[in-house]
Amino acid sequence: MDNVTAAQGFSALGSESRIEVFQTLVKAGKNGLLVGDIQQRTGIPASTLAHHLKFLSTAQLILQEKKGRAIVNRANFDHLENLAAFILEECCSEPGPQS
């Protein structure tokens, strides 16, 4: 993963509402949720929710699948794992301060 992709992913989570939407989708698991279900669980108005879903989708944090007229939204667990791995990749590789 490159810095640009990582920055987009972390930036997309830079809003309390988007974190709430994303956590709702993480809780739903691989089955995902319809927009109406997300709205019901979060209380976010439809127009605002659409904006947040687009932002999360653009950052590859969620996957959207059209089923007939409905759109199923799912957390992109693979991308989330890659973001976590990216930020932790060099964990503890630098020596700490000397006492």
Image (tube, rainbow, N blue to C red):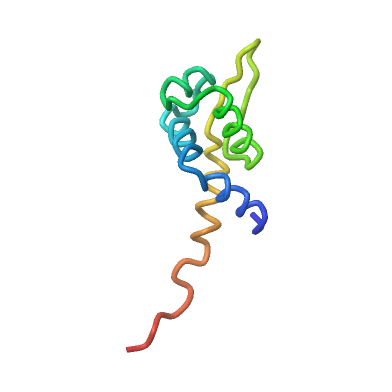
Say how many tags the image has.
Answer: 0
Question: x, y (%) of residue 31?
Answer: 49, 23
Nearest the viewer among 94 and 53 is 53
In this view, the residue farthest toward the top is 68
In this view, the residue farthest toward the left is 99
Say which residue appears at 46% left-offset and 42% top-offset.
Answer: 16
* Quadrant housing the C terminus: bottom left
Write down the quadrant of residue 4 in the picture. Answer: bottom right
| Rendered view: 60 above or below 95 | above
Write down the quadrant of residue 63 in the picture. Answer: top right
* Quadrant housing the N terminus: bottom right
Say which residue appears at 41% left-offset and 23% top-offset.
Answer: 41
Question: x, y (%) of residue 39?
Answer: 48, 22
41 left or right of 3 in image: left
Nearest the viewer among 38 and 26 is 38
Question: x, y (%) of residue 68?
Answer: 65, 10
Say which residue appears at 59% left-offset and 27% top-offset.
Answer: 50
Question: x, y (%) of residue 83?
Answer: 55, 51
Say which residue appears at 44% left-offset and 70% top-offset.
Answer: 92
| Rendered view: 7 above or below 93 | above
